[in-house]
Image (tube, grey):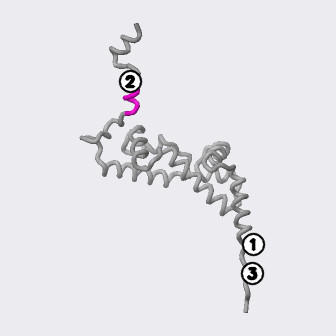
Amino acid sequence: MPGKTEAKRGNSPQKQSLRRHQRPEGLGVAGGVSRPAHDSAIHRALEFIYRNCSQPIDVDDVVKDSELSRSALHYVFVEQLGRPPGQLLRLIRIEKAKRLLMEHDLMLKEIADRCGFRSLNSFCVTFKLLTGVAPKQFQRQQWLGIYRSSQALPARNDR
């Protein structure tokens, strides 16, 4: 009977659920990695992300550079920063893309390359997912907003 075998091995659905939600190895409150070690790991990972976000890096690259396992890094990021490292990397890249779209008249492929995206498609999909608009639409909205605000300025009286 599968039910008894699973229970003997400790694979009951309740135990599997508990294991999924446990803290990663070494992050327990007693005897685990201390708070300063968490802060150091986050600091090092953030430095790596900011230094290399223009390159096509991913979370595995951040993990290789950090002192923690992938699950521990994920846990610490969510605990301390409110989001996992992959999501933070995408947000940083999209913020950089927004600046480039507002400040430069670059082709989208060039912006995608400068922001570390592996393809134009992944850049456009990620941009729209996080901002709600396509990159070119965002650029037009920004340029129109700047144009409209410069038109709204009162005429200067030179006396």
Residue at left offset 43%, top offset 45%: 78
In three-dimensional space, the C-alpha distance between marks 1 and 3, rounded to whole angstroms, equals 9 Å
Judge left or right: residue 149 versus residue 9: right
Judge left or right: residue 26 versus residue 60: left
In three-dimensional space, the C-alpha distance between marks 1 and 2, rounded to whole angstroms, equals 64 Å
Position of residue 38 measured from the top left corner of the image (x, y, whole percent)? 34, 48
**Residue 142 magenta:** no
Which of the two discs, 1 and 2, sits closer to the camera? Answer: 2
**Kind of residue sitting beneath label 2:** Gln
Q: Nearer the viewer, residue 109 or 27?
A: 27
Query: Residue 145 lies in what quarter of the image?
Result: bottom right
In three-dimensional space, the C-alpha distance between marks 2 and 3, rounded to whole angstroms, equals 71 Å
Query: What span is colored magenta in the figure?
Result: 17-21
Position of residue 91 measured from the top left corner of the image (x, y, whole percent)? 55, 50
Binning the other alpha carbons within 10 Å of mark 2 as few (below 14), some (14 to 19) or many (20 upward) gives few
Query: Residue 27 lies in what quarter of the image?
Result: top left
Binning the other alpha carbons within 10 Å of mark 3 as few (below 14), some (14 to 19) or many (20 upward) gives few
Q: How many numbered markers are drawn?
A: 3
Q: Which mark is residue 151?
A: 1
Q: Which residue is mark 2?
A: 14
Q: Which residue is mark 3?
A: 155
**Residue 19 magenta:** yes
**Kind of residue sitting beneath label 3:** Ala
Position of the C terminus, as image quadrant, is: bottom right
Who comes first in sequence, dot 2 or dot 3?
2
Task: Kindly state the secondary structure of the residue where label 1 is placed.
Answer: helix
Who comes first in sequence, dot 1 or dot 2?
2
Q: Which mark is residue 47?
A: none
